[in-house]
Amino acid sequence: MKSLHSLLLLSLLNLSCAVQKQTKAKSDDLKLSNLKENEKVIIYFTSKGCFHFQNEKYIFVDKAIEIYNIPISWSSDQKEIIEESPELLGKFILKENQLKKLDKLLLFYAKDKPGGCTTEDKVVIEKYINNELKNTKNYTDASCSSDDQKDLVTFFKLKDDLNKQKK
């Protein structure tokens, strides 16, 4: 009985170590500027506040970005908000300095920050290698401070850059 108890304890310890290794974030995992040919990152960004709601999907492959709006609607039948099919807003090639500033944005979201703001950003990052999902990270930020950071590009700014390129 004692050896069974020890075996279970050892198994739980090994499982705990494996989970810690999986969830430990490497800074390279968050770098869009280092994407290899067989890698893709999809970021789902939702920002909601008193006077705005933004629900978008960003696909990064090499230096290219595709930006999608994800509309939502109320389902009377299901009594819940449902996401509709994403609508492509556009795509463009990012410059090296934009990619590095996006790296800083992702590191900003990865840090613990005090909340207290009525605007809340939710960021889900999915990293794919050979079209297979390898890593997912989830961040929530209610600090209202992403715009105050120097040397980073926000998702709002990416949409502005897209709109400028369309003109």
Image: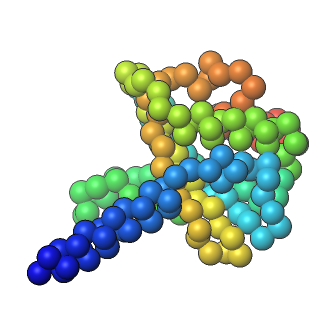
Image quadrant in which the C terminus is located: top right
Q: Give the answer, above or below, for where 161 lies relative to 50.
A: below
- Residue 61 position, x and y percent, is 77, 60
Q: Of 112 and 69, which appears nearest the observer?
A: 112
Quadrant in the rendering for residue 62: bottom right
Q: Is residue 46 left or right of residue 107?
A: left
- Residue 165 position, x and y percent, is 85, 40
Q: Of 94 and 52, which appears nearest the observer?
A: 94
Question: Residue at position x 75%, y 35% from top?
Answer: 101
Question: Residue at position x 33%, y 64% from top?
Answer: 13
Residue ranking furthest to the top: 148
Quadrant in the rendering for residue 117: top left
Q: Is residue 13 left or right of residue 66?
A: left
Q: Give the answer, above or below, for where 65 lies relative to 116.
A: below
Question: Residue at position x 66%, y 46% from top?
Answer: 27
Question: Residue at position x 78%, y 58% from top?
Answer: 35
